[in-house]
Image (spheres, rainbow, N blue to C red):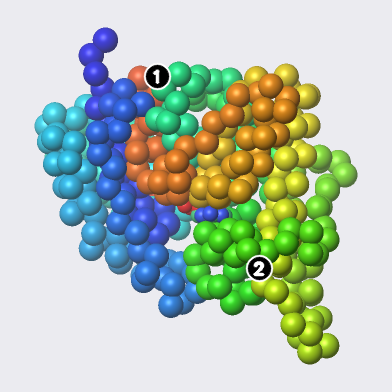
Amino acid sequence: MKDVKILAIESSCDETAAAVVKNGREVLSNVIYSQIDLHTIYGGVVPEIASRKHIEKINQVVGKALSDAGETLDSIDAIAVTYGPGLVGALLVGVSFAKALAFAKNKPLVGVHHIKGHVSANYITYPELEPPFLCLVASGGHTHLVMVKSYLDYEIIGRTRDDAAGEAYDKIARAIGLGYPGGPKVEKAAHEGNPKAFDFPRAKIDEHPYDFSFSGVKSAVLNTINGAKMKGEEINPNDIAASFQAAVIDSMRERILMAIREYGVKSFAMAGGVASNQTIRHALEDACSGVGVSFHCPPPILCTDNAAMIGAAGYFEFINGKRDGLDLNAIPGLQLV
Ligand code: KG4
Ligand code: ZN
């Protein structure tokens, strides 16, 4: 079969990214312009600033992705773009840019779901990996436990009832004065702390045992910090970080092991920005090896937002015949199934 090279574009949040991916598994280029520094002073992503920066950078980023890959707009087979979920103004930049290229060069256009992109980062990392497998997608906006039944067909087993895991990390980071982005900073602080110093809650939702809730642990952390302040007591922020992380890991592990048992899972994967956390990764890898389930997790650069993952997901959509028209729109609340 002829090679299929896809130019992929991602602009759903604060990364302007483009990549060229061959046959869904091989990354020929992966260019990421991160806006993190720009948003740090505001303590989080400012949507209007994100959109403006995407507009400023996208042409350059796409051009570099093509030249790094040694490709041109004429030599690629299709254009894949994230069309949701995400910030509408940010998504629109990528979608409009991709549509303009598709129109100008008469190339097929494939709209990609951002979460399917995160999951597909595993196809790049593990060329042999094929569905079905269980996947924990944990990012700044989403926490989903999904059964990936085929490349295109997903079943959601559990989801967060309130905060996403990454969002909880970001809020804890703010509470202990570490700033934005929170995930990597809390992970680092947790290395220096005692995970048993505080017993933060591991929430369970009676009727929906696979659903997550991180707002309880977040409130418990805030109460602990405020209580100590009122009493004039010192608390070690590293202990808070480590105890918070232990609660997050326990709630993930419990649900994953339960799903492995109930669904007869043989293969498990992680995806999303939170999957770049090495402590979580090692804990879940141990849990899987304890029950004989093969474990997968992309390297950090493919866990946080990037376009290579969109190129991988776009490839499987493309070879299965998905084509979008020039009426493709950004859908900020796009559902997974
Ligand atoms: O997937 P991603 O790059 O963007 C979204 O689609 O949301 O995820 C970003 C989220 C942020 O909330 C960030 O704090 C979290 O992933 N994150 C981490 C780590 N690195 C990034 N959370 C925990 N530990 C990390 N090392
Ligand atoms: Zn993401």
| Residue 325 seen | no
Q: Amino acid at mark 1?
A: Asn
C-alpha separation, residue under disc 1 versus residue under disc 2: 48 Å
The residue under label 2 is 238
Residue furthest to the right in view is 206
x then y, percent, for residue 124: 40, 30
Task: Depth check: give the residue in front, 325 or 56.
Answer: 56
State the image quarter where residue 268 is shown.
top right
Q: Which residue is at a point 70% across and 74% down the rendered structure image?
A: 236
Q: Which residue is at a point 41% across and 22% down the rendered structure image?
A: 127
| Residue 188 seen | yes
The residue under label 1 is 320
Cβ at disc 2 under 8 Å from ligand 1: no
State the image quarter where residue 141 is shown.
bottom right
x then y, percent, for residue 184: 52, 59
The quadrant the N terminus occupies is: top left
